[in-house]
Structures are given as C-alpha cells and as structure tokens.
Image: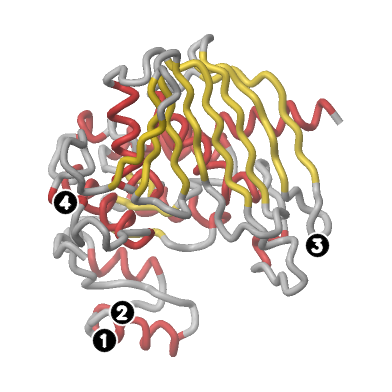
Amino acid sequence: MDGLFDVVAGCFSRDAQVNAETAHRFGVSEGRCYPSLDALMSAEKANLDAVCVLTPTPGHAGTVIDLLQRGFNVVCEKALATSFGEGQSIQVSLAQTGQKLMTTFNYVGYPMVREAQALISEGMIGEVQQIYCEMPQESFARKDTNPQDWRRNDYAIPCVSLDLGVHVCHLTQFLLGGDDFAILSAWEGTFGRVNGVIDTVSATALHSERVLVNWMWGKAALGHTNGLKFRVFGDEGALEWSQDVPDILFSVNENGVRSRLERGQHGLRVASQPRYNRFKAGHPAGFVEAFANIYDDFHRELSLDSESAAASPFSASVAVNGLKILSRIHEIAKSAQ
C-alpha cells in the first residue's frame, strides 16, 4: 500500500494452478513461482528481504525454523506457533542464526490504538487500575458454520486462543507495556456448533501485581463478526476503543466527562501523523490500512540491528510470551474443571 515492499517470488499454493494464478495476480514472474518452500529457499537465498509465512498455524513452527536456518528474515502470521514449546524452539533458531522475525499482530496497527498506548504511557489517565479486553465472534454459532479442518481441532493451546486469544493478550501487552501477567482464574468451554473443540475462553489476571486484567474471547457470540474492544480505567481517566469504529477513541476525564478523539484531528499524540492518514479525517481507514501500518513498521525494523528489532512489539519474544500466557490459561482452566 505504501510502496515499501514488492512481492517478487513465492510459493502460493500446493495446487499448481492456484499457485500460478496467484503469482500472476501479484505480478510475480513464472520463473519465480515455486512448487514448494524448499525450491523457493534454494533459488532465492540472498535475493529477498523477508519471506512471509501465511500458512495455517499448525505448520508455522517448522516452516519458520527452516527459513531462519537457511538465512531468511521472516514475517509470520499469528499465531507464531501452537504451543509455548514450539515458540521456544523458534527463539533458539533465531538466536543461533541472527536473523529477524516479526509476527503480524495487525490490530495494534490501528492509529487510535497507538494513540491510546501513547496516552496511557504519558500518564494521561493516571495510574492504570483495570483493563477489559474482549473479542467475541459468531463463526462457530451460526447455522451456516463451516470452519477449515485445522480449526476443528485443538492443539497444546486451544485453537480459539491461537486465533483470537493471541490478539487479546498482545493488545493488552501493547497498551500496558511489559509481560508480567499472573493468571488468577480461567475458564474454557463450548457453546457453538463445532463439537469437540473449545470455542469460548474467559480469564482474569494481574499485570505487574497492580492492574486487574479481564479477558474474554470466543466464537459462539451471535451478532458479533469481530467484536474486539478494550476499556482501560485509570485513577484520573479512562479510554475505550472498538474495532467496529476503529478511527474513534473515547476518552473520559477524572470528572466523568466523555470526549471523542478521531484519527487525523489536531492535537493527537500519534494518530495525526501523515503515515496514519492516507485518507483525510472523515474517510474511515480500517483493517487493510492497519496491516499496512505494521508492514511499514517491519520495513523500518529490517534496517535495524537485531538487538533493536528485538525490542519491537512484533518480536519473537513478545509472540512467545503470549503463547506462554495462553498456555497457562489453558492449564488453569483444565485444572478447574
């Protein structure tokens, strides 16, 4: 979207026809469309700035490790892996190879989410006391539900947590900073139409021993195609944001007066920057632009040294810590049943 990357090679599908058609659609020459990952790695070493891993989650760990060990930087779709152990194995390969790895947690690409993070870090709502973050969806509750086969299975971490929970945990980490979460309670269950898999998770935690954290995510919430939302309460104010209206952030002061902040308006800390305003205020940006914002971040990180890139909110350490949190939630939920 911003002209920072070109798609120049790829293996787009196991189906030869789909592979060729996709390459043509992206303007990739026939000679750089490969039938397998191994063929791509053999032919393209030293030719690419990064390889994007966009396969289903169960195949991520092996693919990412292969790419790192063959000398490629990697951009991986969330979730980075299906277990905390797989995530640790990826970190070992990352340390051994010195390559860079970024994970696409796209929701923190929304300008007003970044505005909220800036307001919190500057102390504009005082000391944070509580955060509520939820992501209800309806995909397993509708009569026409037909999820992909890999989403009909649970792994070391339930698939609903790999799909949705990673976003809720990452968004909370992004807003509050740090990775110190002590899980207080957790519950997992099934309410939808896909038998044999967990589709709803609820958990509470303490962040840095002082902030009460309430999380919920699930796929059995009729009426919500994507209900991602957060509310942050401090002792001097509050913030509220919803993915349904991503250009708007509501701010409340210590007297309870509610204000509406909108992307592009004067006086914002972050969201008035040109990079977040491809369209002027009043012309809503959205999901695709959020992806573009994080790929803008990735472009910047590829020019940094590995130590600087490791401090990114998209780094392997952040992604793996999220898997650790989700793994702990699953353990506590199982023990409570």
Name the residue tied to disc 2: 33
Measure how far apart labels 2 and 1 are at the Cα level: 5 Å
The vertical placement of 214 against 254, above or below, is below
The amino acid on which the numbered mark 3 sits, given as a three-letter code, is Arg
Q: Nearer the viewer, mark 4 or mark 2?
A: 4
**What colour-coding does the image apply?**
secondary structure
Q: Residue at x 50, y 37 (%)?
A: 230
| Position of residue 127 in the picture relative to residue 119 (left or right) | right
Q: CA distance from mark 4 to mark 2?
A: 32 Å
Q: CA distance from mark 4 to mark 3?
A: 42 Å
- Residue 7: x and y in percent read 23, 70
Q: Secondary structure at mark 1?
A: helix
Q: Nearer the viewer, residue 109 or 90?
A: 109
What amino acid does circle 4 point to?
A: Arg
Residue type of the residue flagged with mark 1: Glu
Mark 2 Cα-neighbour bin, 10 Å: few <14, some 14–19, many ≥20: many
Point out the tag, 3 or 2, that comes first from the N-terminus: 2
Is 284 displayed left or right of 226 in the figure?
A: left
Give the Cα separation between the discs numbered 1 and 4: 34 Å
SS state under label 3 = loop
Q: Nearer the viewer, mark 1 or mark 4?
A: 4
Residue drawn 40% across the image and 15% down it: 236
Q: Is residue 196 left or right of residue 328?
A: right
Q: Residue at x 54, y 55 (%)?
A: 57
Q: Which residue is mark 3?
A: 193
User: Which disc number belongs to residue 275?
Assistant: 4
Cβ atoms under marks 2 and 1 closer than 8 Å: yes
* Helix, strand or loop status at disc 2: loop
Residue occupying the point 56% across, 31% down: 132
Which amino acid type is marked by label 2? Cys
